[in-house]
Amino acid sequence: MKVTQLNDINEQQLNQIMQIWLAGNEEAHSFVRANYWSDAFTAVKQQIALADIFVVMDAEKIIAFAGLADHYIAGLFVKRAYRDQGIGGAVIDYLQQNYTELELNVFEKNEAAFRFYQAHHFKIVEQKLDEETREVDFKMKWVKQA
């Protein structure tokens, strides 16, 4: 499974990424009000264009991606049909090989993602109530061991 960084994202790639982002958030966060993610779509699309994007492809289609700002993982998403095949783990492994530390946020109620990050040695460093969603949010961090 090859993880690559997209250096110049074209419109087609950006649209594929955004569809994965929207579907993934709606599926994983049923506890968040229905239009929260669609309301954020345009702002996130602009942020993704500025982020470091790492993808897994199947032929010409993006099937998974992670968006990073410095060492912060703003999101990691795998298309539904490709889940539970080790793709998300491959992306995290790649990032852990190429960064000395990584941070992310995950909702407490997103139990599958929380367990996934714990399995990849992320630790909770902060717990707070997300003001927009009114949901408990964990900040998690991983640091490369010397």
Image: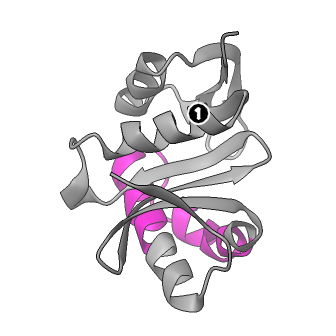
Dot 1 alpha-carbon crowd within 10 angstroms: few under 14, some 14 to 19, many 20 or more: few
* In-front residue for pair 20/39: 20
Residue 143 part of the magenta-drawn span: no
Identify which residue is drawn at 48% across, 26% down.
117
Residue 64 image position (x, y, % from top left)? 40, 59
Main SS of the magenta part reads helix
For this view, does 44 lie left or right of residue 2? Answer: right
Q: Is residue 31 magenta?
A: yes
Does residue 54 appear to the left or right of 47 in the view shown?
left
Can you identify the residue that label 1 sits on? 97
Q: Residue furthest bottom?
A: 11
| Image x and y of residue 68, in percent | 68, 51
* Residue depicted at x 50% and y 25%: 108
Q: Is residue 53 left or right of residue 117?
A: right
Where residue 115 sits in the image (x, y, percent)? 39, 21
Q: Give the percent coordinates (x, y) of residue 9.
A: 63, 80
Q: Is residue 39 visible to us here?
A: yes
The span picked out in magenta is 19-46
Q: Is residue 142 above or below residue 105?
A: above
Q: Dividing the picture into quarters, in which one does residue 42 lie?
A: bottom right
- Given residues 1 and 114, the one toward you in this image is 1
Q: Secondary structure at mark 1?
A: helix
Colouring:
one colour
- Does residue 92 sit above or below 68 in this rendering? above
Specify whether residue 30 is in view: no
Q: What residue lies at 49% left-to-right and 37% top-to-bottom?
A: 92
